[in-house]
Amino acid sequence: MEKITKKPNIIELAMKYRQVTFALFGLFLAFGIYSLMTMQRSEEPRIDIKQAVVYTLYPGANVEQVEEQVTDKLEDFLFSMEEIDKEDTYSVTREGRSVITIDLHDYVDNEDLEIVWSKIRGKLDVIRPSLPNGTIGPILNSDFGETTAIIVSISSDRHSYAEKKDFLELLEDKIKVLPKASKINRLGIQDEQITITTNTEKLARYDLNLNHVAQAIQQENTIKGTGELNSNAFNVPINTNALYDQVDQLENQIIYYEPNGKTVRLKDIATVERGYSDLQQKIIKNNEDVLALSVEMQQGFNIVDFGKDLDEAIVQAKELLPADVKVDMIHSQPEIVEEAVNHFFVEFAIAVIAVILVIMVLLPFRMATVSAIASPVSIVITFAILNFLGLAIHSVTLAGMIICLGMVVDDAVIIVDNYVEKLDEGMGRWEAAWKSATQLFVPVMTATAAIILAFLPLGFMMTGVSGDFVFTMPITVSLALLMSFVVAIFLTPYLCYLFIKKGVHKQEEDKKDKKPTVLDRVQNSYDKSIEWVFKNGKLSLGVGTLTILLGVFLFSKVPQEFFPKLDRDVFNLEVWLPEGATVEKTEQTVNEIVSDIENDEGIKSISSFVGESSPRFHATYAPEPPAENYAQLFIKTVDAASASRLLNTYKTELANKYPGATVRVRQLSYQNAPTPLEVRVVGENIDSIQKVASQVEEIISKSEGANWLHSNWREKYYRMAVNIDETEANRVGLSTAGVSEIVGGLLNGVPITTFWEGDEPVNVILRLDETYRKDVTDLSNIYIPTPMGTSIPLRQVAKLEAKWMPGRIAHRNGLRTVTIRSEAQMGKYSSEILADATPKIEALQLPAGVSINYGGDLEDQNENLPQLVKSLGISILLIFLVLMFQFKDYRKSLIILSTFILAIPGAAIGLLGLGHPFGFTAFLGTISLIGIVVRNGIILVDYADELVRDHGYDLRKASLLAAQRRMRPIFLTASAAAIGVVPMIIGGSSLWAPLASVLCIGLMWSMFMTLYIIPLMYYLWLKPKNESTEVKQLNASVI
């Protein structure tokens, strides 16, 4: 008798030394539970916006002068740096100011950002001397891309502004000591000042001018050293202190002595008022002026815990504040994160329960229990590893977990199914347990690798914002699947041995009158139908081919939206008035809007940022540069459903309701572009590009669904030019620059001294009263001082000329670019609007030097889709190589890969039937679908090979038996995976519902196609060449 030496089997060893196995799994489970309670949390992955803004002021210069002398020079200089992405760098030039938004290339590492910003600052220092005299800046704001954690406000109707400012400082002191707190900025702050206002008539009465007034005040408000006393032991310094410490001291300042000896004091020729600088921005919350703080969190901390620390700090501050002072949250990222994560955990829990219930319903209790254990064990251990890797819990990691829920039970289901089959064959429990896993080790490992390889390239192919967003998904899915494989191979066999003591057929013999289960009925129906498919092979293949063509046709009907809107209980109204409008007029319009909507059902609070934008509170919501004619209304609703309803209402009601104002109803979006639809008209000639832009705007306006259509150049504005007669000015001792400075000081005010209150400086401003700042005639009559000691009217040395100028001049890639932007009405997609408008736009006759390109959602799609397609191509190639490694036959490998093509109709039906567009996450769902359906093909083909190789069946019989035998595990795993994502569909998230729809419907469709078409293809394609003519024809049709 031949002696057989049994080789050690690692699976059997894991069963034999089960105490060690259970101890290791228990340890990882404990760490996983601990991780769930302590891991970092965020709403979404950290997205690094590699942007900065260069601000430059050029007071007095018109928009074309600022463009030519500042913006063009800075852009040319900045574009010499290789790190800057020219195509995504844009600028906006306005009267007296230039704002350039720099975008860096994706290849710049996050760790190198500060180095790059420092390099840019150095470049700006080099170019600063070459800019015109009077230029302020350029200044680089490298914090532009940072997202604030909270915006907290302070208000009181009983306390002065100065007192409220003190209260804000007290609150800031409590917050800045928190270890997790990072940058803190004050918002809505106005500079206090003392304004001395006079007029030329009063000055002329005493033969004075503004220089006389300024010099008199400056000579008195000073500290001077007057020497020192010397003694034998000490030197005692002596100084005269003439600093003002009361406003009435300033009013009583002697300016002039008349010849008769009478004194002329400041109050005789001017009014002195203590107040604030001309309003440039303010914040209003629920009809009250407020001051606010924006607070950022340091990286690496749990933002929910940070929120608790902030709440405690606010409570401590409130204890020190008067009772009437209100401290309110305008924006709280910790609350948003906690709510979002909790919502995802609820969906996750529902999905876990749903998957377990499916298994319980379709399998006998003991089999179902052993299979279902794999899901929570695999997921909890995955959380432990994610925590070890320093990754956070957020929507993407949780979505990855939900996607995996059905898949992580697959390996266990297949092992359990094989175990009970061996029991039915009469094998002992112990042997059946370890052999069931050993026998399927390679196919299960291959199937698991196929799904991992479907996801893994995403982490390496995607760059930029999309890469930051999706990076953790392939990691999460890969880890979860690896853990499910480990659980199925090393834990499930012993659980089978422990709990399942009889095979399925044995149980049926014990219960003769037992009613057939749902799975039994499905199995019986399938056994009959697969026989029919084999008997009618040509017809079956024809139907399969038609369904693929149907899928391609249906996909062409699916609307496209690459990045969707964000479902949240917040939205914004952005208000623009004509260029040149004052902040007071902007505030008046804002108050009208608030009055109209504040009582609408569903609105919780309205915070208005007048003259400025709120800090960046979401990664893709870029703040607008400060402008007196701009305001942002930050509207918080009771829930996301209310926000959606109000968005739909306001988009039509508010668009043209307020004369002279443009109101944009802006929903948060995952898209980085300002609007989903952008058409850019590029050229150097302003008249030419504006003419073409007007034509484009008219075309889009006629497309159904366009909303809030406008140009980023805005309307023209009215400006007054002071044309100085250099000859006449020089004759009276004035230069052109001197006249400009004097006129600017007279109108805007000139700082002449500083009023000190302890360590708090208050500027003292001298200017003419507002009469001279309102009327052109009065402006020409103002008197300006000359070096000769006399004053002359401005009209003597200058003429005033009114002129219309472009409101803004925008550049992109250093070129003048008019961008026509449009939102889409609720229920419409920008792709549909653009599809209607593009043929007409392309038909325009463009002037020489003018071109058109597209931004918005289409640009995002064009930038990201090639990366996704490349990732998909690499996934398919890697999966094919893995299949070749296992099966060593290209025909079998191609048969298995064809399961993906068979899933296309299901994916299209899922999107169309459930009303979702095809975009970024739908593509992710398609990639997920590849791995899962290929897994089913592997399990089926591997078993057919085994029947042919080890049991001597012919191809037809082996194909039929493999299909019938593997129907249960394939049906179970596909059903579990499909049911697992149903909570995401029910949740209705615009981001994740498309992915779930593709997976759910695509899986169920591909399951049926895999079970019917793949066995038939296996038989026909691999049948020996001495086949019948009919089979040859069938085989040819397959090929």
Image (cartoon, rainbow, N blue to C red):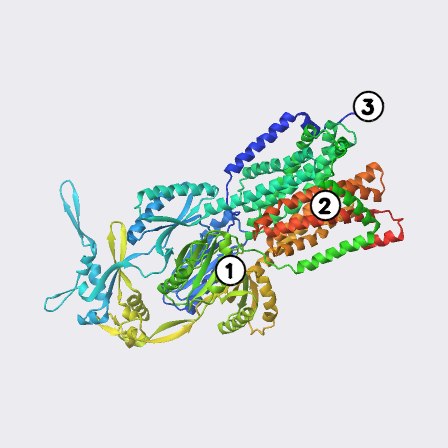
Q: Horizontal and vertical percent for residue 906?
A: 69, 52
Residue depicted at 30% across the width and 46% down the height = 322
Q: Earlier in the sequence, mark 2 or mark 1?
A: 1
Q: Residue 648 carries which label?
A: 1
Q: Earlier in the sequence, mark 1 or mark 3?
A: 3
Q: Nearer the viewer, residue 426 or 821?
A: 426
The amino acid on which the numbered mark 2 sits, given as a three-letter code, is Leu
Please, is residue 783 above or below residue 476 in the view?
A: below
Q: Is residue 250 shown left or right of residue 448?
A: left
Residue depicted at 31% across the width and 65% down the height = 748
Contact between marks 1 and 3 (CB within 8 A): the answer is no
Mark 3 crowd level (few <14, some 14–19, many ≥20, 10 Å Cα): few
The answer for how far apart the CA atoms under marks 2 and 1 are is 50 Å
The amino acid on which the numbered mark 3 sits, given as a three-letter code, is Lys
Q: Which of 978 and 775 is in front in this view?
A: 978
Q: Horizontal and vertical percent for residue 61?
A: 38, 68
The amino acid on which the numbered mark 1 sits, given as a three-letter code, is Asn
Please, is residue 887 above or below residue 435 in the view?
A: below
- Specify the quadrant of the image occupied by residue 833: bottom right
Q: Which of 711 and 919 is in front in this view?
A: 919
Q: Is residue 266 shown left or right of residue 587?
A: left
Q: Is residue 594 shown left or right of residue 824?
A: left
**SS under mark 2:** helix
Residue depicted at 39% across the width and 74% down the height = 803
Q: Nearer the viewer, residue 969 or 870?
A: 969
Q: Earlier in the sequence, mark 2 or mark 3?
A: 3
- Image quarter where the N terminus lies is top right
The answer for how far apart the CA atoms under marks 2 and 3 are is 39 Å
- The residue indicated by pointer 2 is 881
Inspect this view and state whether residue 57 appears.
no
- The residue indicated by pointer 3 is 3
The answer for how far apart the CA atoms under marks 1 and 3 are is 81 Å
